[in-house]
Amino acid sequence: MDERSRVFIAALVGAVAGGLWGWLYMTDGGRRVRDQIEPKLDDFMRELTRMRGTVEKARSVASESWRSLNDVAGSAEGRWSA
């Protein structure tokens, strides 16, 4: 892809994004769409936050499990070595 194509695509994406922003924030129809979307986005963000907490708990449990396994393996070596 040459430089001219990249510039054209970037300008096109910018124009579409600007048009969408203008429609969402400058028209009654856009306001209605925002009013419908915002609660769903809030729910989505809440779910992401819950998932992040779950991943952190799982990471903590895995870390503690590895630590316990290493402790057990280390103490077993000390008992069985001559």
Image: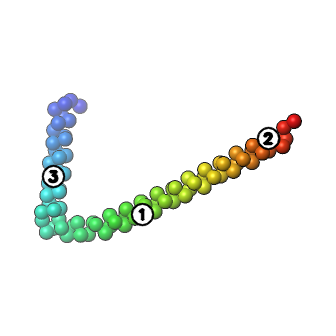
Given contact means CB atoms under 8 Å apart, are the residues at marks 1 and 2 in contact?
no
The image shows residue 16 at horizontal and vertical percentages of: 17, 50
Image quadrant assignment for residue 42: bottom left
What residue does disc 3 label?
18
Instruction: Count the labels in the image.
Output: 3
Q: Secondary structure at mark 3?
A: helix
Q: Secondary structure at mark 2?
A: helix
Q: Residue at x 51, y 56 (%)?
A: 55
Of 41 and 61, nearer the camera is 61
Q: Which amino acid, mark 3?
A: Gly
Q: Residue at x 42, y 60 (%)?
A: 48
What residue does disc 1 label?
47
Where, quadrant-wise, is the N terminus in this rendering? top left
Alpha-carbon span between mark 3 and mark 2: 66 Å
Q: Which amino acid, mark 1?
A: Glu
Q: Classify mark 1: residues with Cα within 10 Å, few (<14), some (14-19) or many (20+).
A: few
Q: Classify mark 2: residues with Cα within 10 Å, few (<14), some (14-19) or many (20+).
A: few
The image shows residue 57 at horizontal and vertical percentages of: 55, 58
Mark identifier at residue 77: 2
